Image (spheres, helix red, strand yellow):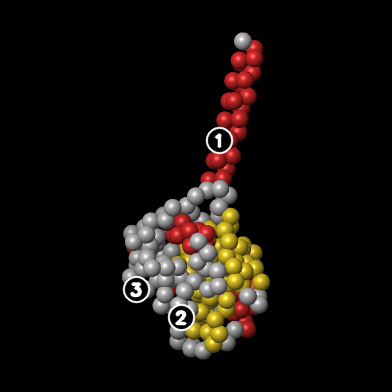
Amino acid sequence: MKRLFKSFFVILTVFLLTGCSNDEEITENPIVTMEIEDYGTIKIELYPEYAPNTVANFVNLIESGFYDGLTFHRLVPGFVLQGGDPDGDGTGGPGYTIDGEFKANGYSKNTLSHDKGVISMARSMDYDSAGSQFFIVLDDSAKSSLDNLYAGFGRVTEGMEILEEIEANEKIADDVTGALEENITITKVTVDTFGYEYTVKKN
């Protein structure tokens, strides 16, 4: 009887510990590591609590290797640095779109303000046209024209000085569009999801 009780206690303990571990994994925000050619590496924390499907989309694209070798193609100093277009000119995407998770599109849970360092999804005039292109906010003043109109979904946690260096040194070919004279290569992008699997809903 004692052996049976002891065995049951061990099994119960293992079960409880496993359950705690899974809960901890699910509540850990994904961490993205992005290597930028000639500049260095930045890290980005993603926020599923604000934009779950947007985060899932970004994670899925990273895990498929989609962003490896793509570029930043647009820079507006004091505003944003934009990339993630397979065509490299602002016209491309992954072949599908996702719904815009922001207030103007009827989604009220995304209260993330577009402060400096926030990563958000680029889109056309259509609110549900985001795919793979993203931008990183370069100045707090950008939030006045971006909040509630774009799906912010994370924040740069390491390497903001690298983005400031890009902003200060890269040459712009078109002041209207922000097109760069030479695109900046995103060498490699990886993500740590802490064991949690993200499923994206595509249009």
Q: What is the distance, in whole Å, between disc 1 and disc 3 at their CAs?
A: 44 Å
Residue 56 sits above or below residue 147 on the image: above
Q: Are marks 2 and 1 in contact (CB under 8 Å)?
A: no
Residue furthest front in the image: 64
Q: Amino acid at mark 3?
A: Met
Q: Is residue 82 above or below residue 22?
A: below
Residue at 53% x, 64% y is 65
Task: Please name the amino acid that badge 1 sits on.
Answer: Gly
Image side of residue 140 versus residue 38, left or right: left
Residue drawn 62% across and 82% down?
168
Sequence-first disc among 2 and 1 = 1
**Is residue 117 shown left or right of residue 126?**
right
26 vs 78: above or below = above
At numbered mark 3, what does the secondary structure look like: helix, strand or loop? Answer: loop
| Label 2 to label 3: alpha-carbon separation | 17 Å
Residue shown at 65% from the left, 75% from the top = 39
Q: Around disc 2, counting alpha carbons within 10 Å, would you say few (fewer than 14), some (14 to 19), or many (20 or more)?
A: some
Residue linked to disc 2: 89
Please state which amino acid type lies under the numbered disc 2.
Asp
Mark closer to the chain start, 1 or 3: 1
Quarter-wise, where is residue 18 in the image?
Answer: top right
Tally of marks:
3
130 and 138: which is toward the camera: 130
Residue that numbered label 3 is attached to: 125
- Residue 53: image tag: none
Place of residue 120 in the rendered image (x, y in percent of width and height, measured from the top left):
48, 66
Taking the image as shown, residue 137 lies to the left or right of residue 37, namely left
Residue picked out by circle 1: 19
Q: Nearer the viewer, residue 114 or 100?
A: 100
**Residue 19 at what x, y percent from top left?**
55, 35
